[in-house]
Image (spheres, rainbow, N blue to C red):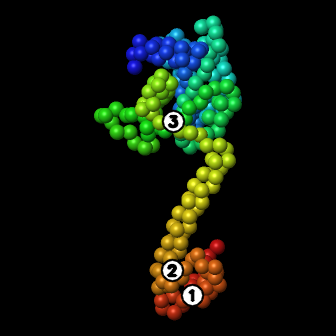
Amino acid sequence: MSGTNIRFLQEKNSTESGRPVLFVSLELSRATWLVTSLAPGSEKMSKHSVRGGDGASLLELLGRLRAKAQEAVGETVQTIAIQEAGLDGFWVHRLLVANNVESQVVDAASIAAPRRRRRAKTDTIDGETLLRTLMAWKRGEPRVCAMVVPPTPEQEDKRRSSRERAVLMRERVRHTNRIKGLLAGQGITDYDPVRKDRRARLDQLRTGDGRSLPATES
C-alpha cells in the first residue's frame, strides 16, 4: 500500500470516529510480542517488541505511543488494535478492552494471500499486513477479512474443557491400541483394556502357548 493510500485511510477513519486513530497490530508468540503501529498523520509504520506474555509492558508501550501521537496532533487519540485468533486465547483482547483500547481479533485464514503463494494454515501474518487489513476493515471493506467474536471467559472455559477431553480421548485410543498390540504379540487377542474388570483379568490371561503373562520389571 502506498503512502498516499495510507494517508487516505488515516484521514477517513479519523473523520468517521471523530478523533485521530493510532492503529496497532500485534504478532503474538511465546517469546516475543511484535507491535507494529501507525500514528495519525504519519505515513511510516513503526515496530516495537515486548516480552511474550507481558501484558503490563504491552499496555505501557501502547500508552507511550498514544501519548506521543496526541502530542503530535494536539488532541485525544483513539487506539485500535488487531491480533490473530490463536493459541493465546482471548485474554490479551480482554486486557486491551479493559484499558480503553478497541481490540479486533481476526481469523487469519480469511486474510487474502498473494495468488503466487497459498498460505499454509500455520503461517503467521506479518504486522504490516495485519495493520493494513485493520485499516481497510475500519474503512468499511468487510470482505477484506473476517473478524472473530471473542467468547466470554465462561464460554472460553467450556471450549477448553471440550478440547482437552478430545485430546484425552485420542490419547486413550493410542494407549489402548498399544496394549492390544503388545498382548497380540503374546497370542492374546480377547483382552479389552478399557473394561472395568481389566485389572482382575490380567491374572487370568494366558499366552498363546499356555504361559502366564511375564512379570513387569520395575
Q: At x 56% / y 67%, what residue is drawn?
A: 172
As drawn, the label of residue 147 is: 3
Q: Quadrant of the C terminus?
A: bottom right
As drawn, the label of residue 20 is: none
Q: CA distance from mark 3 to mark 2?
A: 51 Å
Residue 6 sits in quarter: top left
- What amino acid is labelled 3 in the image? Met
Q: Disc 1 designates what residue?
A: 205
Q: CA distance from mark 3 to mark 1?
A: 57 Å
Seen as rendered, the residue at the extreme bottom is: 210
Is the residue under label 2 in contact with that under label 1 (CB below 8 Å)?
yes
Could you say where residue 195 lies in the image, as x and y percent from the top left? 60, 79
Is the residue under label 1 in contact with that under label 3 (CB below 8 Å)?
no
Crowdedness near tag 1: few (<14), some (14–19) or many (≥20) residues, C-alpha within 10 Å = some
Q: Disc 2 designates what residue?
A: 183
Q: At x 44% / y 27%, what residue is drawn?
A: 141
SS at mark 2 in the image: helix
Residue 111 seen in the figure: yes
